[in-house]
């Protein structure tokens, strides 16, 4: 099922349907969370911790240059 969803997301990205692809990414994340037994409270705790870490990061977004890509706050791992 995940492979099918991932393929649909690739097709949406290729056809410049960014909003639909992003919505599908959220569905994929939800399915992965259920498969791994991660609940909403765990995800919220992770996001809160990552936001705290980003806030204490010495490079604020206003100081970053175009040569330094912004670090993602959340990354989905297969």
Image: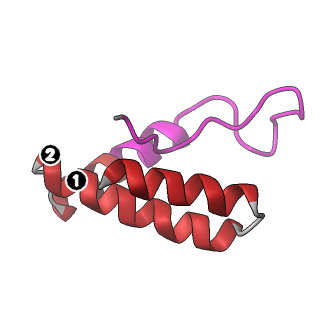
Q: Which residue is mark 2?
A: 36
On the image, which quarter does residue 67 sit in? top right
Q: Nearer the viewer, residue 62 or 4?
A: 4
The quarter of the displayed image where residue 14 is located = bottom right
Place of residue 15 in the rendered image (x, y in percent of width and height, measured from the top left): 76, 63
Instruction: Provide the major secondary structure of the magenta segment.
Output: loop
Q: Residue at x 34, y 35 (%)?
A: 78
In the current view of this chain or complex, which residue is farthest to the left?
37
| Label 2 element class | helix
Q: Position of residue 26 (x, y in %)?
A: 42, 64
Residue 15, disc: none
Which of the pair 72/13 is nearer the observer?
13
Based on the picture, tell me whether residue 73 belongs to the magenta stretch. yes
Circles 2, 1 touching at the beta carbon (< 8 Å): yes
Range of the magenta residues?
Answer: 49-77
* Left or right of residue 26: residue 55: right
């Amino acid at each position: 099922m995940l492979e099918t969803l991932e393929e649909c997301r690739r097709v949406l990205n290729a056809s410049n349907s960014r909003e639909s692809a992003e919505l599908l990414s959220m569905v994929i994340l939800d399915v992965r969370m259920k498969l791994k037994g991660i609940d909403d409270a765990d995800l919220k705790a992770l996001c809160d911790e990552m936001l705290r870490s980003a806030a204490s990061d010495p490079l604020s977004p206003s100081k970053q240059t175009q040569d330094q890509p912004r670090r993602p706050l959340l990354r989905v791992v297969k």
